[in-house]
Amino acid sequence: MLFFLLFTFVDVDSLQTCLQGCSLNQRIIKLSVDAIVQLSYGYSKMNVSKSGYRVFSANSTTASAELAKKITERLGVELGKSTVYQESNRETRVDVKESVRGQDIFIIQTVPRDVNTAIMELLVMAYALKTSCAKNIIGVIPYFPYSKQCKMRKRGSIVCKLLASMLAKAGLTHIITMDLHQKEIQGFFSFPVDNLRASPFLIQYIQEEIPDYRNAVIVAKSPSAAKRAQSYAERLRLGLAVIHGEAQCSESDMADGRHSPPSSRTTTGHTGLELPCSRHHVPFPGIELPMMMAKEKPPITVVGDVGGRIAIIVDDIIDDVEDFVAAADFLKERGAYKIYIMATHGLLSAEAPRLIEESAIDEVVVTNTVPHEVQKLQCPKIKTVDVSMILAEAIRRIHNGESMAYLFRNIAVDD
């Protein structure tokens, strides 16, 4: 107990000075003081030592772990030793094979077609690292799933906010992602989010791989994509065109029960406030709301000149390609002689490769935020741009405590 008090409340150097003038010959006390000195110096060195970092992949499939391998090669580190697999009953199991205590851990999770399994793998991996006393757990999620479900629609739910809460509860302290579907998604998180951009890589591809790109025009396939297209056009010094009148099922205000008139009432007496459907029949005094005009889709048209030019359609996600195929056909009719599609996340679900191959689209360029090697085998028009460089640099800067501003240079707010 005495030695514990000495170690806790007395400065070690002062204690040694006092004992030098003491005439006691009890070697036990001297040996005890030496032990306290060694413990104290060892304790202080342990505190000031800089923690390292590890990079893990939370994917159970080899194809999905390719991006993680490219990132670790650029960082010059080895991929962390772990096992992620599905048991016979489809439960996700994660085994971390090395110590992560006191270290910064980066979990790279690319999202394949089986989105829900990928989410569970990430959650279980993050919680396993949290319970293993990792210092910080940073999720590197190039394509953030459920990002399209970030708004309240009818009687649905904002699933993206739910996922953000689940990641925080699992132990994540930071997220690195790329081109969120809506930038406001960052407000769903209770920890920092770095939303990187793929546009510099796609613009470089346009400049280096598209012959005569100076004769091109940047096209937004809907008015909602006009800001992104404008950013590309301004940096490439090209013209801008916007397709208007295309049906946007995911964004439309479809009729639902909340817009229905109230059911007829057969009860006697006063029934409360009524919302009449017309001015000619008002059974009881109540509140009368103005009639809402129904939306009508205008005839499809394009604002801008595309005749005799290369049309480059830009977007953040290409999943179901029917809208892109219809836009390409329309641009061909208006005189565009080549059609390119540029998108960050190439989900390319369902029959997308076949539809692209049979369409008027000349080339689809996407990044490797989502694995799509199978789709490339089915359709040679699909090309890939590697973005592992910027993800690796983000990891390095976050671990070293450096500013991330360099990665966002010349990036517009609407990009």
Image (spheres, rainbow, N blue to C red):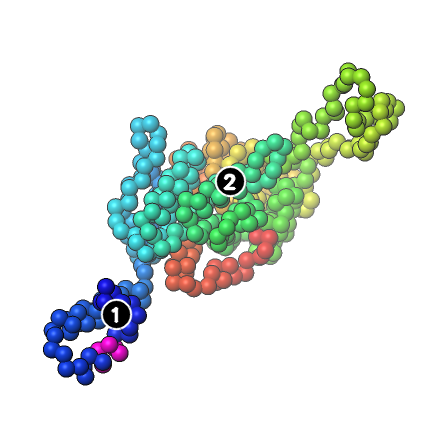
Choose top left, top right, bottom left or bottom right for residue 89.
Answer: top left
Residue positioned 57% across, 52% down in the render? 415
* Residue 375 to residue 1: above or below: above
| Location of mark 2 (residue) | 162
* Secondary structure, magenta segment, majority class: helix
Observer-nearest of 315 and 233: 315
Quadrant position of the N terminus in the picture: bottom left
- Identify the secondary structure beneath mark 2: helix
Task: Estimate how packed mark 2 is, as few (under 14), some (14 to 19) or many (20 or more) residues with alpha carbons within 10 Å.
Answer: some
Choose top left, top right, bottom left or bottom right for residue 26.
Answer: bottom left
**Three-letter code for the amino acid on which mark 1 is drawn:** Leu
Please state the horizontal and vertical placement of residue 327, each as a whole percent of the image: 60, 37
Outermost residue, bottom direction? 21
Residue positioned 52% across, 61% down in the render? 409
Please state the horizontal and vertical placement of residue 108, each as a whole percent of the image: 38, 47
Residue positioned 31% across, 64% down in the render? 47
**Three-letter code for the amino acid on which mark 2 is drawn:** Leu
User: How far, Cα to Cα, is label 1 from label 2?
Assistant: 51 Å
Q: Is residue 133 visible?
A: yes
Residue positioned 59% across, 40% down in the render? 151
Q: Is residue 66 visible?
A: no
Q: Residue 15 lies in magenta, yes or no?
A: yes
Observer-nearest of 49 and 55: 49
Residue 6: image tag: 1
Segment colored magenta = 13-17
* Residue 88 to residue 43: above or below: above
Please state the horizontal and vertical placement of residue 132, each as a whole percent of the image: 31, 48
Observer-nearest of 67 and 100: 100
